[in-house]
């Protein structure tokens, strides 16, 4: 029997397969690899915040909370900045400044 929308609404379905999210996140990290560490983390954070669906960010952050296996360290650092944003002052929202 097919599930109705109300039956599937309560179950949180991942928006995308986790391996695809990890691959995409690491590609973002590769792009920002030449940047200095602080700017690299800001660039990764800004990209995730600007272009990723909030559900994708949540999946990524949940994976990091569970250990972050398969993610490059700079990606983890950038994604963790998303968690810290509630305490940050509003500021620059674009790509990293040179």
Image (cartoon, grey):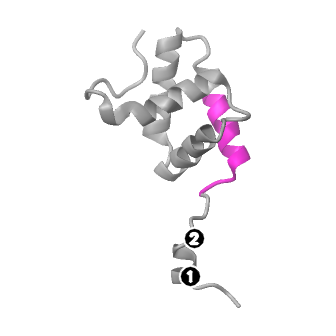
Residue drawn at 58 percent across, 40 percent down:
65
The rendered magenta stretch, by its main secondary structure, is classed as helix
Compared to 20, does 36 lie above or below?
A: above
The quadrant the N terminus occupies is: bottom right
Q: Are marks 1 and 2 in contact (CB under 8 Å)?
A: yes
CA distance separating discs 1 and 2:
8 Å
Reading the image, the residue beneath label 1 is: 7
Report the residue at 49% width, 49% height from top. 53
Q: Nearer the viewer, residue 73 or 31?
A: 73
Against 43, is 52 above or below? below
Query: Magenta residues?
Result: 15-28
Query: Per the image, is 6 magenta?
Result: no
Specify whether residue 23 is painted magenta: yes
Residue 19 in picture, x, y percent from top left: 73, 45
- In the picture of the structure, the residue carrying the numbered disc 2 is 11
Q: Is residue 10 left or right of residue 97?
A: right
Q: Residue furthest bottom?
A: 1
């Amino acid at each position: 029997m097919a599930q109705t929308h109300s039956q599937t609404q309560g179950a949180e379905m991942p928006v995308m397969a986790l391996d695809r999210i990890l691959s995409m996140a690491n590609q973002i990290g590769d792009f920002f690899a030449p940047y200095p560490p602080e700017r690299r983390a800001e660039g990764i954070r800004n990209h995730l915040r600007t272009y990723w669906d909030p559900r994708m960010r949540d999946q990524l952050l949940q994976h990091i909370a569970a250990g972050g296996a398969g993610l490059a360290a700079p990606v983890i650092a950038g994604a963790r900045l998303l968690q810290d944003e509630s305490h940050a002052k509003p500021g620059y929202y674009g790509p990293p400044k040179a």
